[in-house]
Image (tube, rainbow, N blue to C red):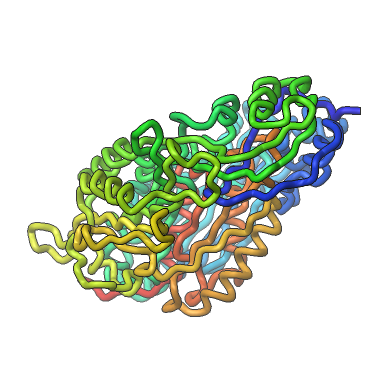
């Protein structure tokens, strides 16, 4: 018997330019669907929730849940993830609640420096549900901040800045947090460890997120980061950065456009910049003679059962698979499959607009997985030629604020300080810097399988990947807990001191290649991102020697949550610089 299906979303697992080998033939639709759903991703398993896990497969509906689960879903419940990345202790002084089954006893008496706590919140979904909880910072003269819940127009969880202030959060202001039903709602306070020993001004030196000025967070932190080497700094990053929309692709993907487009987020590169991202994974392709971003995988005989066209929601997809080989009786996924995202010209325009408007920001664009989709045919080893790469780099000369001031041959960029990487402002003020864009080419050519030759573009802001010492290895799993274990184990191995090579934390889930009818990748990514703050800032996870330099995610959010969780590392864990 077939599993109860609502219209399914195809989410083709395209993993760059990897070659996916043949898999055994599934002899029936039932066997295939059973394979897909026997071990669904446990995207919310890390949470001790009273509600069921979220369901990225799309195979469950509320009607299939137990009565107790349905009852739980009628409550407003979440976890305030309170991260105190400051040298100050937060002391609870009291609060009040009305119609809140979980509030008063959930908050700890103290939140110690460097501590992360999860506060369970539950309301009854009435409009007059309300609660407050106050904390003071004794080391700052008893200045007060208050957490509030409001049922009206909600659920709303917010922070009221009573007598305490932070950057972009003045006294008297109220900052709404983004409510995530049944999941983490992060709030971060961050300040340098030396803040207790100086004339600390919270309005200039206390960072809070949400509330981080994401478009200019590096400029905001330059005073304390200017002497840090790139390998000592932490940057928010995005995976498959240009894939926020579908501008073309193979017929199979165009039949199900949601299969590729959400690998990064629903935001363009320009919007990601505004939201705080500073590391970008851009994969250039030639499509119809134009340069675009792309996401493609070569399938070498993935066999699927016939009869898929009869499954609700899969007709168009099954039809396109049938055209690839085998017809309706034995469908075979073969050859290059994928889609195109933003055009390179649009990314250039957005980067220019951002850096012109926001001086003092470092932008790293990693270029890899280059393909000519007009000619790659069924060649699994397809790459761009040297001539094609030179055409692309010629177009990228239109990027303004390229790091042309870095002219040392074969320099290891990770040993340059932020003040080295960002050019001085025209007025000579050491505390003011321009923005800089590093264009890092990480690919080989189709001519001789050698790395792309950058000699014609020397001193033009282009660098090969060997000049950026970084460990980057993704987990290649669709299981959240397995991904978390894999990435943190690698961080503990490869990042044992602050002067080690950079470490990229690949906080991404990868779907198995045959799962062409499983739910949207953006749901996987959003669930994974909800676990980021809880797991990254868990007690003992990071130290002043061991922390990620790039945190790369899919579904990068526009509310500054990921940016705040990563940027806070630069306030609390990295070294400190002398005053300018």
Q: Position of residue 472 (x, y in %)?
A: 51, 63
The quadrant in which residue 558 appears is: top left
- Judged left or right of residue 332, residue 535 is left
The quadrant in which residue 414 appears is: bottom left
Q: Position of residue 192 (x, y in %)?
A: 39, 69
Residue at 72% in and 36% down: 57
The quadrant in which residue 127 appears is: top right
Q: Is residue 26 visible?
A: yes
**Depicted 177 relative to depicted 542: above or below:** above
- Judged left or right of residue 191, residue 485 is right
In the rendered image, which quarter contains the N terminus? top right
Q: Position of residue 488 (x, y in %)?
A: 61, 66
- Judged left or right of residue 219, residue 288 is right
Q: Nearer the viewer, residue 111 or 394?
A: 394
Residue at 27% in and 68% down: 226
Residue at 34% in and 34% down: 290
In the rendered image, which quarter contains the C terminus? bottom left
Q: Is residue 180 visible?
A: no
Q: Position of residue 5 (x, y in %)?
A: 79, 26
**Depicted 81 relative to depicted 141: above or below:** above
Residue at 42% in and 78% down: 499
Q: Nearer the viewer, residue 488 or 260?
A: 260
């Amino acid at each position: 018997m077939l599993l109860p299906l609502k219209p399914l979303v195809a989410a083709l697992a395209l993993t760059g330019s990897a070659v996916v080998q043949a898999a055994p033939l599934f002899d029936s639709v039932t066997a295939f669907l059973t394979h897909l759903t026997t071990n669904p991703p446990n995207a919310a398993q890390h949470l001790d929730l009273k509600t069921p896990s979220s369901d990225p497969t799309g195979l469950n509906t509320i009607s299939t849940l137990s009565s107790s689960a349905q009852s739980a879903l009628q409550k407003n419940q979440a976890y305030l993830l309170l991260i105190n990345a400051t040298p100050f202790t937060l002391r609870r002084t009291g609060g009040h609640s009305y119609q809140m089954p979980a509030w008063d006893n959930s908050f700890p008496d103290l939140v110690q420096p460097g501590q992360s706590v999860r506060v369970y919140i539950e309301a009854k979904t009435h409009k007059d549900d309300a609660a407050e909880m106050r904390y003071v910072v004794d080391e700052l003269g008893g200045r007060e901040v208050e957490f509030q819940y409001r049922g009206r127009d909600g659920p709303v969880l917010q922070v009221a800045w009573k007598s305490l202030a932070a950057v972009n959060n003045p006294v008297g202001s109220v900052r709404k947090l983004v409510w995530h039903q049944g999941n983490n709602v992060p709030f971060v306070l961050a300040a340098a460890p030396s803040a207790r020993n100086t004339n600390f001004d919270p309005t200039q030196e206390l960072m809070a997120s949400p509330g981080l000025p994401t478009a200019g967070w590096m400029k905001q932190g330059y005073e304390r980061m200017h002497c840090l080497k790139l390998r000592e700094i932490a940057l928010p990053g995005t995976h498959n950065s240009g894939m926020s929309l579908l501008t073309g692709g193979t017929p199979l993907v165009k039949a199900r456009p949601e299969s590729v487009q959400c690998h990064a987020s629903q935001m363009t590169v320009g919007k990601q910049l505004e939201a705080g991202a500073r590391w970008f994974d851009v994969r250039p392709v030639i499509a119809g003679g134009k340069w675009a971003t792309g996401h493609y995988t070569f399938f070498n005989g993935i066999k699927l059962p016939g009869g898929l066209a009869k499954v609700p929601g899969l007709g168009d997809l099954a039809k396109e698979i049938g055209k690839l080989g085998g017809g309706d009786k034995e469908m075979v996924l073969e050859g290059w499959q994928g889609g195109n995202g933003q055009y390179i010209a649009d990314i250039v325009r957005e980067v220019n607009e951002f850096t012109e408007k926001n001086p003092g920001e470092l932008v790293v664009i990693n270029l890899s997985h280059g393909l000519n989709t007009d000619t790659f045919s069924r060649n699994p080893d397809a790459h761009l030629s040297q001539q094609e790469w030179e055409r692309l780099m010629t177009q990228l000369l239109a990027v303004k604020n390229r790091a042309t001031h870095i002219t040392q041959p074969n320099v290891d960029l990770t040993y340059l300080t932020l003040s080295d990487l960002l050019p001085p402002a025209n007025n000579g003020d050491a505390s003011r810097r321009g923005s800089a864009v590093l264009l890092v080419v990480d690919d080989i050519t189709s001519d001789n399988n050698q790395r792309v030759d950058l000699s014609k573009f020397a001193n033009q802001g282009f660098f090969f990947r060997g000049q950026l010492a970084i460990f980057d290895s993704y987990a290649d799993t669709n299981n959240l807990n397995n991904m978390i274990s894999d990435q943190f184990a690698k961080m503990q191995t490869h990042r044992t001191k602050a002067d080690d090579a950079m470490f990229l934390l690949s906080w991404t889930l990868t779907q198995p290649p045959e799962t062409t009818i499983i739910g949207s990748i953006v749901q996987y990514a959003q669930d994974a991102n909800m676990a980021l703050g809880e797991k990254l800032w868990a007690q003992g996870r990071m130290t002043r020697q061991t922390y990620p330099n790039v945190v790369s995610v899919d579904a990068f959010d526009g509310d500054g949550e990921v940016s705040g969780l990563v940027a806070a590392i630069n306030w609390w864990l990295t070294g400190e610089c002398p005053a300018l």
